[in-house]
Image (cartoon, rainbow, N blue to C red):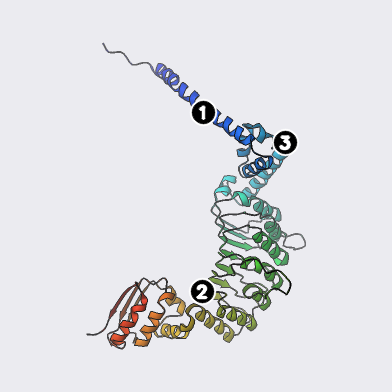
Amino acid sequence: MGLSPAPPASRERQQRQHSAPTFRTRRAAAAERARAAAMAFSKLSGDEQGIIVGQLRNALEPRLVMYFSSANKELRALLPPALQRELRADYEEATALCLNVGMRDCKELREATEINWYEKGLTAADLATLAKLGSVLPALVGLWLEERSASAESPTGFPDGALRLADGLVAGALPALTYLTIGLRLGDAGASALAAALDRGALPRLRSLNLGLTLIGDAALAALAPALRRRPALKQLYFRVNHFGDEGLAALVAPPPPAAGTPPPPPAGALKKLDRLDLGYTKVNDAGCATLAAALDSGALPALEELELDGTRASDEAKAAVHEAMARSRFGALAEEAAALCVKLGMRSCKELREAKTVYWHCKGLSTADLATLAALGSKLPALTQLTLDEPSGSAGPDGVQRLGGLGRRRTASRQPS
């Protein structure tokens, strides 16, 4: 006869007996690792231990430092009751902020990659709390803050919220942030505070900054401009609907040389990657347009592709001069030929040609000179991958086809009559 199977209770007892040594072994290994970590921590200097505690202090997840301190007496000594109470208060502030903006908990804020807070009734204290949390939001890439109500201001209308936000951003705060929109009253004080935050290393990866409708005047932009010019990765600046004019714009794109006897400014990226600048509905006039054109002709804004000047005080002639300077900046000596070619081909602007990926031109009456211009523009057309030219009239002739050699390795097809 075969043996009857063990009853369920017996099987469970056998499994526990079998797994108990494994569990004890794992627990012993964990305890040994904890002792080794504690010994290593005890050998660090006081300053080094303090740095570790500072990194573990996370107002969005305070339990981490408490867990570590419960396993290490040196770490526990660095967390006296007063510091624990402070950590608890920071956590309660962060929780209140999350609930105020409609988030479930601090975990949602900690893991957010994008935050769009529009008219959430944020107070100056809320914005100060957000700034304080800047060093524990490693995943945040995009932040949009817009508060047009008076909640973020002091009772006297002073832009206290923007000031406290900028003042609280420490070095390295918001380390992954790429896109920032601040829809708060900045004014001179807020702009200066934001400049100081950028200069001490906050927002190290910032590429796009939107400060539209923030009451920035000439003095505010002059205060902010040096910090912006020291950001080599900056690609987009939006200043739409603000109070600055020609003086503020000059501080941004063409700052005067330092006075005699003063030290030179620190190395700057000088807006070399800036490809979009929105100045719509500011007080920029013809003089400001002349400054822009001169900056473009000098090579100060080599990547600028899109420029908004609508609603400014500048004349149509002054705006046209700026756009001509943009064409010269992108196409150099070929600017006029490039513009004529684009008109002939029915394109709205040279920008359309510059950004084209696939082009098919049929019966455009292209001449040998047109094809020579196209070939010369080859290095200025980085997006173009396929070009098809169909000219049955033979206006370009065999010589025109030979001129296309300047287009390099791009896929080029041309057809002339036999």
**Disc 1 designates what residue?**
29
How far across and down, in percent of the image, does residue 364 sit?
34, 85
| Kind of residue sitting beneath label 1 | Ala
Q: Mark 3, mark 1: which one is toward the viewer?
A: 1
| Kind of residue sitting beneath label 2 | Glu
How far across and down, in percent of the image, does residue 222 sit?
69, 71
Instruction: Examine the rendering and report whether any part of residue 11 can be seen.
Output: yes
Name the outermost residue toward the right.
156
**Disc 3 designates what residue?**
81
Q: Mark 3 near mark 1, Cβ–Cβ under 8 Å?
A: no
Q: Earlier in the sequence, mark 3 or mark 1?
A: 1
Asked whether, in this view, residue 38 is left or right of residue 351, the answer is right
Quadrant of the drawing holding the N terminus? top left
Residue appearing at x 57%, y 48% in the figure: 110
**Disc 2 designates what residue?**
305
* Closer-to-camera residue (129/168): 168
Quadrant of the drawing holding the C terminus? bottom left
Instruction: Examine the rendering and report whether any part of residue 211 can be seen.
Output: no
Name the outermost residue toward the front.
261
Image quarter of residue 71 = top right
| Kind of residue sitting beneath label 3 | Pro
Q: Which mark is residue 212?
A: none
Image quarter of residue 265 = bottom right
Q: Mark 2 near mark 3, Cβ–Cβ under 8 Å?
A: no
- How far is disc 2 from disc 3 in space, using C-alphas? 57 Å
- How far is disc 1 from disc 2 in space, using C-alphas? 60 Å
Which secondary structure, mark 2? Answer: loop
* Closer-to-camera residue (219/185): 219
